[in-house]
Image (cartoon, rainbow, N blue to C red):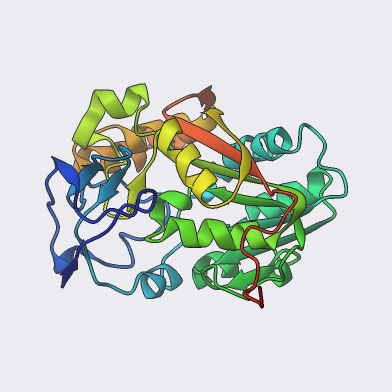
């Protein structure tokens, strides 16, 4: 069954113009499709642009159990972990103005915990991760597993006012209710704590060049952000001192082949060949259209408990 979505920023239902038409039906959904960094196959819902705030979102979507799909999803990007670890630790340092020593970190959507590994090695005192995929947690390093919670982010899952830093790396794009999760992240932060998020930039040169053929136009993504709409949704969720910017990733050349819009059969042939194995060993640092958003928790509670006036 299809359900209409509303804009999470301005909360309008409808009031949007179609950008790309849907090419999926209910048979298009499987655990494989909702596994991290699968080969792009250009399956997607209808994408619309909000007339009020310009946010790009999927509308309508199918009423499916996303948590169940993500719990059963697989961990398929181990070859890129080294580059991702370097990239994301640099973003953690940026959020903390270069000083991560002794801080506590909560990562939402952490895969196999590789960010928690590099965070501890880089100076964080304590870490925790929330990750729905049991396969990803099983793949975590033995000393990291005890720090991971098998779940999506929910109310009362972690203590309020507990962490110096919350991180979400390419998770926000997937959330059907991003404001709800951002508010939970806000509650989990100590006063003065910071959030750092990595997401796709739908206004990047690569997205504009490839348009519907871009790998970010995908059935897994429910919202795609520009710097403007990303800052708007962070401000709506309570964060102060919100700023955004572009960043570069460390990728293997094989992963760049993984992304380019060529026929899947040809892509698999290249990646499974000796040449693909050679390309996996060659790393480059390149900006392909990703951005970060950083915000901080205000001094006063944003969502106080109801009480007598």
In this rendered view, identify the residue nearer to me: 161 or 176: 161
- Residue at the (75%, 58%) spot, across then down: 163
Instruction: State which quarter of the image contains the N terminus.
Output: bottom left
Across and down, in percent, residue 90 comes to: 68, 34
The outermost residue toward the right is: 102
Looking at the image, residue 46 sits to the left or right of residue 275; the answer is left
In this rendered view, identify the residue nearer to me: 18 or 202: 18
Across and down, in percent, residue 277 comes to: 44, 37
Number of numbered callouts drawn: 0
Residue 275 picture quarter: top left
Instruction: State which quarter of the image contains the C terminus.
Output: bottom right
Residue 86 picture quarter: top right
Looking at the image, residue 44 sits to the left or right of residue 242; the answer is left
Q: Can residue 139 be seen in this snapshot?
A: no
- Residue at the (32%, 47%) spot, across then down: 39
Compared to 263, does 24 lie above or below? below
Q: Can residue 121 be seen in this snapshot?
A: yes
Residue 19 picture quarter: top left
- Residue at the (75%, 63%) spot, across then down: 161
The outermost residue toward the front is: 309
In this rendered view, identify the residue nearer to me: 11 or 217: 11
Across and down, in percent, residue 279 comes to: 45, 31
Looking at the image, residue 162 sits to the left or right of residue 131; the answer is right
- Residue at the (25%, 52%) spot, across then down: 58
């Amino acid at each position: 069954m299809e359900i209409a979505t509303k804009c999470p920023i301005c909360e309008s239902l409808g009031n949007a113009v179609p950008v790309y038409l849907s090419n999926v039906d209910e048979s298009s959904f499987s655990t494989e499709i909702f596994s991290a960094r699968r080969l792009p196959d250009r399956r997607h819902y209808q994408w619309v642009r909000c007339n009020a705030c310009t946010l790009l979102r999927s509308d309508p979507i199918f009423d499916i159990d996303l948590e169940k799909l993500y719990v059963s999803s697989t961990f398929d990007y181990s070859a890129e972990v080294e580059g991702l670890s370097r990239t994301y630790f640099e973003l953690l340092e940026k959020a903390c103005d270069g000083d991560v020593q002794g801080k506590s970190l909560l990562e939402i959507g952490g895969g196999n915990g590789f960010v928690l590994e590099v965070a501890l090695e880089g100076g964080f005192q304590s870490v925790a991760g929330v990750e729905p995929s049991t396969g990803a947690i099983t793949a975590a390093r033995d000393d990291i597993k005890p720090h991971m919670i098998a779940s999506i982010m929910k109310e009362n899952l972690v203590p309020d006012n507990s962490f110096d830093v919350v991180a979400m790396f390419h998770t926000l794009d997937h959330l059907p209710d991003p404001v709800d999760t951002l508010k939970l992240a806000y509650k989990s932060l100590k006063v003065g704590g910071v959030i750092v998020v990595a997401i796709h930039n739908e206004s990047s040169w690569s997205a504009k060049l490839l348009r519907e053929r871009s790998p970010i136009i995908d059935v897994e993504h429910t919202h795609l952000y520009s710097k403007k709409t990303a800052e708007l949704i962070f401000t709506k969720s309570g964060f102060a001192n919100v700023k955004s910017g572009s960043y570069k990733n460390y990728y293997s050349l094989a992963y760049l082949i993984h992304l380019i819009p060529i026929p899947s059969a040809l892509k698999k042939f290249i990646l499974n060949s000796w040449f693909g194995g050679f390309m996996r060993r060659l790393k480059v640092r390149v900006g392909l259209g990703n951005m970060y958003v950083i915000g901080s928790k205000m001094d006063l509670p944003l969502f106080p408990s109801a009480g007598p006036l």
